[in-house]
Amino acid sequence: MTTDEQLVERAIAGDGDAFGEVVRRWERKIYALAYGFTGSVEDARDAAQETFVAAYRNLQNFRGDAKVSSWLHRIAVNQCITRQRRARVRAETGIEEAVESAGEAFLSTGEQSSPARAAETKERTEAVRRAVAALTPELREVVLLKEFEGLTFQEIADALQVPLSTVKSRLYTALRQLRMRLEKFELEVAPR
Amino acid sequence: MRERINANGAGEAHGCGRAEDLLAYLYGESEPAEAADFRRHLADCAACVEDLAAFGGVRASVGEWREEVMRSIPALNVAERVAPFAVSTKTETRAADVTYAIESDRARTRTRSASAALREFFSLAPMWLRAATATAAVVFCALAALTLARAEVRWDSNGFAFNTGVAERVIEKQTPSPEPKGFTQEQIDALIRQSVEREVAEAQARWRAEEADRVNVVNAGGVVERRAAPSRNTGGTAASRSQQGPRRSTRGGSNNQLLAEDNGDVFYPGEESVPRLTDILGAVKSQSKENER
């Protein structure tokens, strides 16, 4: 099977189909990462598309010694952070509610086995989504790259261009904060 | 691998200081020897055991959310949108094409942004504004429905016509007339002709009456002037005037016509045989002078 790095090399050499294959391999993962980061279907779709556009524009700058996955994730995270800044401005004008409702609507479209289980799952996933959204961008990107994308610590460090120890410390902090928020949610739900 | 966790205050929450080993163990990234060593550590460290269990729960919850997200990913078609443009040769041109394609795609989804903006407006608006907007919308819809229900669209030889039905309702209350409205060109010409003939006949009758009056005046008081005194105005005698009759008549006719036109009166050819008023006055004056003498 052709590796991502080989595909990118072919794309740089002028093989248009090669870059299309890279996009096909990664579009869902990049979208999921973007959705986890922004909490909005529209923003996630736009961020995913812009990630690949930015990647295509910078094909010539791709370093052969780096991994394509790290490269794409770095671009995606930067896209998300940019969007997050815009979202912060929008939140000040009251659009955050629309984003919240969009996220809820998006999660409600999943198939569920039974109404009771569906409601329970929806509540829990919504709690997780809110807990992740409450993290700072630095903590959130590490969690999403680890949990959504399954990158190794080293890949995350490469993608974010930060030291390995920083990745671990951020992830540890993020997990502790998520734990506290989810336990609080469990306590709120338990008496029902 | 034994880096201390101290950024963002993470390390200080973990008592034993093996948070990095815990993370590596949790995510399966520790070497076999390191994993064995950490397992032995767990037997003596309640904090690490507690963290490991709690973080496992967090990971499960996040994983559940991730599954939900992955199940619900909409059709992206990013590859289909990007790949065709990647076939061309120049990178800058291709990137511009891709950007254009994505902008077009975003324009298609912009309707949702508009609806989000509308929701935002209503969420921010006070209650009275929401009620007023809702009432206005209902009234507008009702009026529009009424208008459309009574609307009549017609396209015939007279062209396209759109009638809302309001004017039609008023016409229905009037007594319908079987006769066609308006006149034809022939009818208008006939009416004008009749009117003109009637006016001419009346004018002629009036002229005849006036002529008869003037003849009576001349006969009553001024027969003398025909045979007597010279007229001041004409500067000649009645005889000489009679001699010049035909010529003067013609010239006098044209003079009278000009004079009449100047005075705003109308002079008619039938009046040529009527004596001039100045002549009559001159005759009357000369006679009165003779009488005084």
Image (cartoon, rainbow, N blue to C red):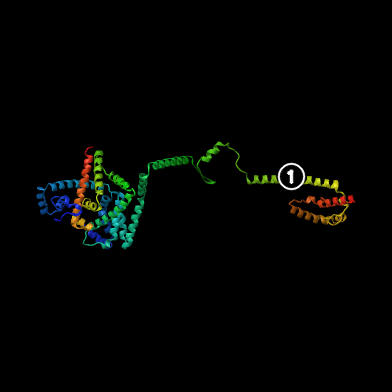
Relative placement, left or right, of A11 versus B49 is right
Examine the rendered structure and indicate whether residue A89 appears above or below residue B166. below
Residue A157 image offset from top left, x and y in percent: 20, 57
Q: Residue at x 28, y 61 (%)?
A: A58
Q: At label 1, which amino acid type do we have?
A: Glu
Q: Which residue is mark 1?
A: B202
Most foreground residue, B49 or A15:
B49
Relative placement, left or right, of B160 versus A81 is right
Residue A158 image offset from top left, x and y in percent: 21, 58
Residue A151 seen in this snapshot:
no
Residue A100 image offset from top left, x and y in percent: 30, 46
Residue B142 figure quarter: top left
Examine the rendered structure and indicate whether residue B48 appears above or below residue B168. below
Disc 1 residue crowd, few under 14, some 14–19, many 20+, Cα 10 Å: few
- Which type of secondary structure does the marked residue at label 1 adopt? helix
Residue at far front of view: B292
Residue A89 seen in this snapshot:
yes
Residue A164 figure quarter: bottom left
Relative placement, left or right, of B31 versus B189 is left
Numbered marks: total = 1
Q: Residue at x 11, y 53 (%)?
A: B34
Quadrant where the N terminus of chain A sits is: bottom left
Residue B153 image offset from top left, x and y in percent: 49, 43
User: In the rendered structure, the residue with mark 1 lies on which chain?
Assistant: B
Relative placement, left or right, of A185 versus B212 is left
Most foreground residue, A139 or B126:
B126
Residue at far right of view: B293
Quadrant where the C terminus of chain A sits is: top left
Q: Residue at x 80, y 55 (%)?
A: B252
